[in-house]
Image (cartoon, rainbow, N blue to C red):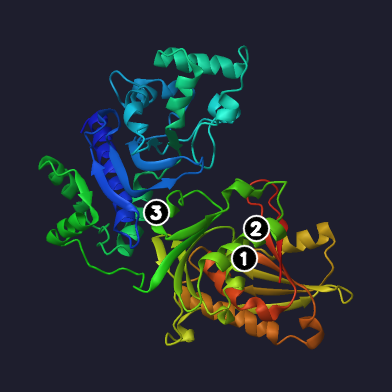
Amino acid sequence: MANPIKARSLGDEYQILFFWLKACDMLKDHSNVDTISYEDQKIKSLDDIVIRYKKPTRDMTGKLVHKEYYQVKYHVDYRNSITLENLISPKFINAAKYSFLEKVKEAIPDLNKEDEPGVAFLVTPWSIHPDDPLAKLKIVDTKGGYFKEEILFDGKSKSHIAKIRGTLKNHLKIEDDEELKIILEAIRIRSNFHQYESLIQFLNGQLLTVGLKPIDLSQRINPYVDLLRRLFQEDQTKFNKEELIEICKSEDLWIGHNIMLNEEVPIGIRSFNRRAENLENNTTTMTCLLHYFEGRYLKDEFSWNIAIKGALEDFIRCNLAEDSSYCIYLDTHSTIAFTTGFFLDPKSGIKAVPIQKGLSGRAIWRSDSRVPREQYPMWQVSHDVIDENGSDIVIVIEMTHPAVQDVKDYIETNQLSAKSILRFYFEESSGFNSIHDGNHAMYLANEISKTLNGLQKEDKKRRYHFFGAGPNGFWFFLGQLSRNFGQLTLYEYDIEITKDYFPTIDLP
């Protein structure tokens, strides 16, 4: 097969896989997605995938969105990037005549319909080039992928930004900044999306959660790719939830198992945007904390103990009811997962279980005491005194990777008054699959609780400092048990810059 033909075939399959990923959003309980279309002819310039909502959602800019139009562009290598030049190049989206920006301009009358407002997404595994003005001048927002008007429309006529505006207007054959603003307001750039293989793996986890058979990775044939191609040949390109389920049933792809119980309500907490862009579609209510953060880092004007802890407590108090059951998406820092569990302790009267991300997708982490503890690897525990005159106890929990040396460095550098280090670790090396499921996570959390409650009376009066890294489902469970721990401080690890820990939330 010639390389261009192979690349086109992979691109078509990638688009189909993305269709099924979005279809999973529609098939979820309580979904707000009304229909999904493939190669939609309503707007021919933006026809790859179209999502229509039952009621408009509000995105991070405050814009009401009734429809989402996706242009999905797969690339077989990383020889190129998203740049300003590529956005005005037809070749970048494998088009003969019109660039992505020109296609959005053509679609503006439909995107800006008062009764059906819409946005246009560009989805690609490529990233924005770090040396391009889009990145260097921070023109594209890192959280939502939209153009920052306050930067791009700076009111100046001779600035570097003004030259960029001029380039865009010349390309689009317009003269007015306001017209350019209208076009760019409709665009969202979703860069660094899954490569082909990781998209299949991620999709497999989503298929299971909505009652569809996973793709058999031992087979060369992908039934979901073949099915959509055949439906397209039959001119079936637009589907609602009921229609798609019936089609999947007829093709023996429906297993009808949804991991969420009928009485459970899906809710969400988001402080990370990656892989959580559409959390609103999967939940009946959620709180988005992204405006408090710049990437992983809390903005200087906010406090973990006031802004974040307060926002979590308010969200739970205002949206969760006693004697009700919830499944919680925790696309958050581990600190936030722990604190959420703290507010949802067993005495709260609210039943809640975490939805945990894993290598094969998401799973609800339920705990079931009927599953024997003996089938899981359990903690090794060491308790080492480092300063008899120290006032506090440091707790190191090693799940995904070793942490004790980094914690010792933090204690020394920051002169933390620590009497001892209580370390929980596995006999085998830690890793991303160290915790098997919800049962395992709850058993491990219980063991930590028992160990802390078994300390000497004077030690139980000390402040505990929690360090470690691991799945949020575990931190949620540990947070639920933490009311008996007394005074404690949580820490996050700066994985990107300092490679060090920093304190976050104090409880209670």
Q: Residue furthest right?
A: 389
Q: Residue 463, located in which quarter of the rendered image?
A: bottom right
The amino acid on which the numbered mark 3 sits, given as a three-letter code, is: Asn
Q: Nearer the viewer, residue 88 or 340?
A: 340
Measure the alpha-carbon separation of dots 3 and 2.
23 Å
- Disc on res. 308: 2
Does 380 appear above or below 194?
Answer: below
Say which element carries label 2: helix
- Disc on res. 313: 1
Q: Give the labeled residue for mark 3.
A: 281
Disc 3 to disc 1: CB gap under 8 Å: no
Looking at the picture, how far across and down is residue 451, in whole percent?
A: 67, 83
Looking at the picture, how far across and down is residue 352, in whole percent?
A: 49, 73
Visible residue check, residue 429: no
Disc 2 to disc 1: CB gap under 8 Å: no
Q: Is residue 46 left or right of residue 270?
A: left
Camera-near label (2 vs 1) is 1
First in residue order: circle 3 vs circle 1: 3
Q: Residue furthest left?
A: 234
The amino acid on which the numbered mark 2 sits, given as a three-letter code, is: Ile
Q: Nearer the viewer, residue 320 or 124?
A: 320
Visible residue check, residue 490: yes
Q: Residue 89, located in which quarter of the rendered image?
A: top left
Q: Residue 420, located in which quarter of the rendered image?
A: bottom right
Looking at the picture, how far across and down is residue 95, in whole percent?
A: 29, 23
First in residue order: circle 2 vs circle 1: 2
Measure the alpha-carbon separation of dots 3 and 1.
23 Å
The amino acid on which the numbered mark 1 sits, given as a three-letter code, is: Glu
